[in-house]
Image (spheres, helix red, strand yellow):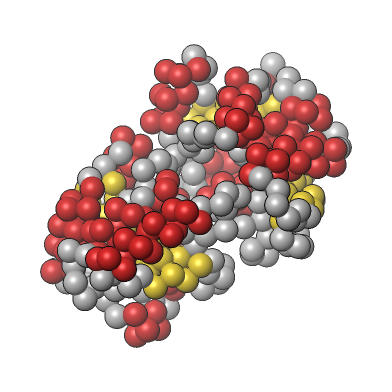
Amino acid sequence: MPSSWRRRMRIALLTYSTKPRGGVVHTLALAEAFARAGHAVTVWALARGGDTGFSRPVDPAVDVRLVAVPEIEGETVGERILRSIALLGDAFSGAFDVVHAQDCLTANAVGRARGYAGLWRTVHHLDRFTTPELAACHERALVEPAALVCVSEAVASEVRAGWGREPAVIANGVEAARFAAAADAGAGAAWRARYGRHVLAVGGIEPRKGTLDLVSAMARLPGVPLVIAGGDTLFDYRPYRDEVFARAAELGVEPVVLGPVAHDELPGLVAGAAVFAFPSTQEGFGLAAMEALAAGVPLVTRDLPVLREVFAGAARFADGPPGFAREIGEVLAGSDVDPAHATVGRALAAAHTWEAAAAAHLNLYRRRVTG
């Protein structure tokens, strides 16, 4: 690493959850890469539901500070957001060269505790909130931090257009070797034996993940199993889940809903899929889809500018249920894995390393810290 990055820095990263959501995965991987580069890293996170740790082991070189958010029966989402901000803001302490929030909630908490001057904030994707507390939280976390980072140029363009700010763009890394190794070791075989030649979606059932469109698409592919993994978010999506399940029943689709999958089992689950479906309507990068490419699994994704930016040449693009059904069907009609496609996808995933992401962040930090 260049000498300009070698001076030991004290870095605080903050994330809103201990669950395996994309921003949380990003936070932990980045923290561990900073620690490997010799920096002192502390990760602060809100812990709900009695959680006492993250969903996976964390490198002991990273100092982890969890702030408990006890459940309160009958509390609204807005009330829970404000209480979470207050709890984290009250708990946050320490002397750091860099304080970097990975979401709007923790950005508000640090802003409440220390002010926004000097605060970094990563915009993983832009949300559209209707809850007043969330809308205000989202706005403050775009306007007030001293510096913004986006994980793709497409999201940075939205920030420029909507808020007149100029974010730095640093792409996500991906644990490509972990997913490639699982595929090469045959870890997907058990999942294929259980579910057959199936379509996999990771991210849970929520509006942003486009689950309703995917269920509608699968109705055009009778007999093809659909497996959905993931979940555990801050918000209450039960009405949308009810809508998805009602639509599935109406169409005769019976999705297998796994919920959160253990960290060690996820690479095998991904490697076992015949197709990875990624129908998200809002994304900042698409980390789960990149993991599928690392495992050599064909990817069908929604045709969004951000996903064109990240996955062009390595994915099939579709719009709406007919398009997803057509593209998934064409993959299933061919061989299990197209070697040429798998090679392109694996190479793309392997090119996104957490070491490179960490080095880019450290370069930005150093310029601002030293002036």
The quadrant of the picture occupied by the C terminus is top right
Residue in the foreground of this view, choosing between 354 and 256: 256
Q: Is residue 125 left or right of residue 118?
A: left
Q: Is residue 258 above or below residue 8?
A: below
Residue in the foreground of this view, choosing between 280 and 35: 280
Q: Residue at x 19, y 58 (%)?
A: 325
Q: Is residue 253 left or right of residue 2?
A: left
Q: Is residue 5 above or below residue 17?
A: above
Q: Is residue 321 left or right of residue 208?
A: left
Please identify the quarter of the rendering in which residue 102 is found. top right
Residue 40, how many percent across, how many down?
Answer: 77, 44
Q: Residue at x 64, y 64 (%)?
A: 56
Residue 58, how many percent across, how many down?
Answer: 69, 60
Q: Is residue 300 above or below residue 156?
A: below
Q: Residue at x 27, y 65 (%)?
A: 250
Q: Is residue 72 left or right of residue 105?
A: right
